[in-house]
Image (cartoon, rainbow, N blue to C red):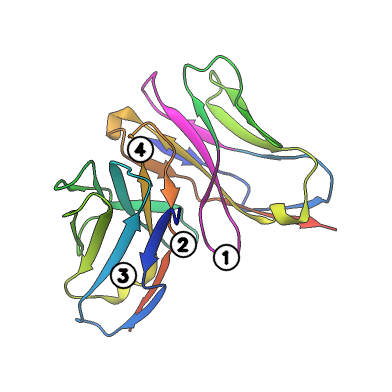
C-alpha cells in the first residue's frame, strides 16, 4: 500500500533561517506525483509545490523548493529565509496511480513554528 | 473568483440526525473531492467525482453519501450521524486528476 511518512511532528526554527521538512514515500509504481500543502491556523489547505516522478529538475516555487531524491524515495520541502507567516502545519501528499490518480494520500504533517 | 467554498463552516449534530454539506467551485474544474481531517492524521478521502453526474468511493466512504448534479457543486450527506464522524471536512477540486487540488476552508462538524 502507498504510504507517506513525515517523521517530524514539530519543528522550531529561527526567523530568516532555512528549514527542511522531511517526507518519505513508498510506492511500487514508477509514475507518481508528490505535493506539499500548508495549513495555517486558520485551517485552509494551501498548495505549495508539485514534483512529478519523471521530472528531472527539482521543483521550485519562490522560497519553496523540493529536494527530490527518487532512489531514496524522499521529497523534502525546503523553505529558504523563513518568515513568521510560515508558521503552520505542512503536509506531504502523493498521487499514486496504483490507487487511482484521483486519490491523494497525505502524511500526518509537521507543525512548523518560526521563532522571531 | 471565490475558488472553493463550503457551507456551513460549523455544525453541531446529535447522534442520528442527518445533514448535507455543500461544496461549490467556480473554476470549472472537472474533479471534486471530499476529505476528512482528524487530529494527528492527514486528510483521508471520503468520496470523489470525476465529472457531473459521477461519484466514486474513496478511502473512508462508510456512513456518507454524495451527489454531483451540477458540475460546480458537490454535496456530502450524512444520513445518520455518529460521534465517530466528528471531524473537519474539506472539499477540494482540480482541473484534471494530475493537477493540484484546491481546497475549501473546511467545515467543523461535531456529533454529540
**Is mark 4 in CB contact (under 8 Å) with mark 2?**
no
Circle 2 sits on which residue? B105
**Is mark 3 in CB contact (under 8 Å) with mark 1?**
no
Circle 1 sits on which residue? A42
**Is mark 1 in CB contact (under 8 Å) with mark 4?**
no
A7 magenta-colored: no
For label 1, the SS is loop
For label 3, the SS is helix
Q: Mark 4 vs mark 2: same chain?
A: yes
| Chain part drawn in magenta | A23-48
Q: Is residue A17 above or below residue B84?
A: above
Return the x and y of residue B111 as percentages of the image width and height.
Answer: 32, 79
**Is mark 3 in CB contact (under 8 Å) with mark 2?**
no
Circle 3 sits on which residue? B85
C-alpha gap between disc 3 and disc 2:
18 Å
C-alpha gap between disc 4 and disc 3:
29 Å
Q: Is residue A44 above or below residue A3?
A: below
C-alpha gap between disc 3 and disc 1:
21 Å
Circle 4 sits on which residue? B95
State which mark lies toward you, 4 or 3: 4
Sort mark 3 into few (<14), some (14-19) or many (20+) by Cα contacts within 10 Å: some
**Is mark 1 in CB contact (under 8 Å) with mark 2?**
yes
For label 4, the SS is loop
Chain holding disc 4:
B
Which label's residue is closer to the chain start, 4 or 2?
4
Chain holding disc 1:
A
Residue at screen point 41% across, 34% down = B99
Instruction: Give the side of residue A85 with respect to residue A59, left or right.
Output: right
Amino acid at each position: 500500500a502507498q504510504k507517506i511518512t513525515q517523521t517530524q511532528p514539530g519543528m522550531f526554527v529561527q526567523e530568516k533561517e532555512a528549514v527542511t521538512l522531511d517526507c518519505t514515500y513508498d510506492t511500487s509504481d514508477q509514475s507518481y506525483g508528490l505535493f506539499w500543502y500548508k495549513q495555517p491556523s486558520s485551517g485552509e489547505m494551501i498548495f505549495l509545490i508539485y514534483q512529478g516522478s519523471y521530472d528531472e529538475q527539482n521543483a521550485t516555487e519562490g522560497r519553496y523548493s523540493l529536494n527530490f531524491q527518487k532512489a531514496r524515495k524522499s521529497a523534502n520541502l525546503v523553505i529558504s529565509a523563513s518568515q513568521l507567516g510560515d508558521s503552520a502545519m505542512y503536509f506531504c501528499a502523493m498521487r499514486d496511480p496504483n490507487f487511482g490518480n484521483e486519490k491523494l494520500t497525505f502524511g500526518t504533517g509537521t507543525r512548523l513554528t518560526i521563532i522571531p | 473568483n471565490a475558488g472553493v467554498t463550503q457551507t456551513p463552516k460549523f455544525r453541531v449534530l446529535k447522534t442520528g440526525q442527518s445533514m448535507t454539506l455543500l461544496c461549490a467551485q467556480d473554476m470549472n474544474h472537472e474533479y471534486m473531492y471530499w476529505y476528512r481531517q482528524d487530529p494527528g492524521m492527514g486528510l483521508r478521502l471520503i468520496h470523489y467525482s470525476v465529472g457531473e453526474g459521477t461519484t466514486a468511493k474513496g478511502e473512508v466512504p462508510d456512513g456518507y453519501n454524495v451527489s454531483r448534479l451540477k458540475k460546480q457543486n458537490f454535496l456530502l450527506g450524512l444520513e445518520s450521524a455518529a460521534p465517530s464522524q466528528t471531524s473537519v471536512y474539506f472539499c477540494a477540486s482540480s482541473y484534471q486528476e494530475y493537477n493540484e487540488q484546491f481546497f475549501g476552508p473546511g467545515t467543523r462538524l461535531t456529533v454529540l
